[in-house]
Amino acid sequence: QVQLVESGGGLVQAGGSLRLSCAASGRTDSTIAMGWFRQAPGTEREFIAAFSWSGATRYYGDSVKGRFTISRDNAKNTVYLEMNSLKPGDTAVYYCAARSIPMSAMTSSSYDHWGQGTQVTVSS
């Protein structure tokens, strides 16, 4: 079992930046691939960013390309989401997720472990 804990959310003005962190613990010795999703009230969970199964490729959702960057520190079992040029439309609960089988990185159903989420609010 893998446990994921997100941190770093908060309130920021439009145009500002935030960095989210996701610390993984538990059975991190097995191969897992990480991603970020978000969900605003009344909407479906949206893909934001993820690593490919090999870790060599990073994928991004169209709405965040060029503004958000996913990175990781393997020594700390931590994945980050650097968010720049934030917009009010980025307001949502952001979730870290891990998948233990090599399925689509951009599909939420591929992920079998989820964090509790962290709120990001961008004011205009």
Image (spheres, rainbow, N blue to C red):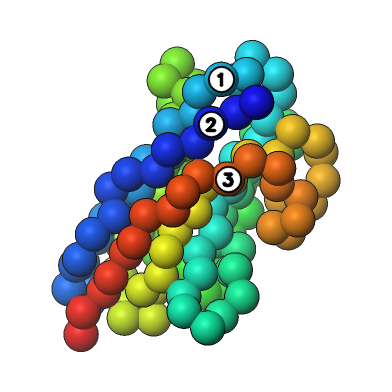
Q: Is residue 52 left or right of residue 40?
A: right
Q: Say what amino acid the circle numbered 3 marks.
A: Trp
In contact (CB < 8 Å): disc 1 and disc 2 = yes
- 85 or 116, nearer to the observer: 116
Q: Residue at x 50, y 29 (%)?
A: 24
The residue sitting at 51% across, 69% down in the picture is 39
Q: Does residue 101 appear in the picture of this structure?
A: yes
Residue position for label 1: 26
Element at badge 3? strand
What secondary structure is marked by label 2?
A: strand
Residue on which the image places disc 3: 114
54 or 3: nearer the viewer: 3
Quickly name the residue at label 2.
3
Give the alpha-carbon distance from disc 3 to disc 2, as whole Å. 8 Å
Residue 99: quadrant of the picture: top right
Give left or right: position of 28 versus 107: left
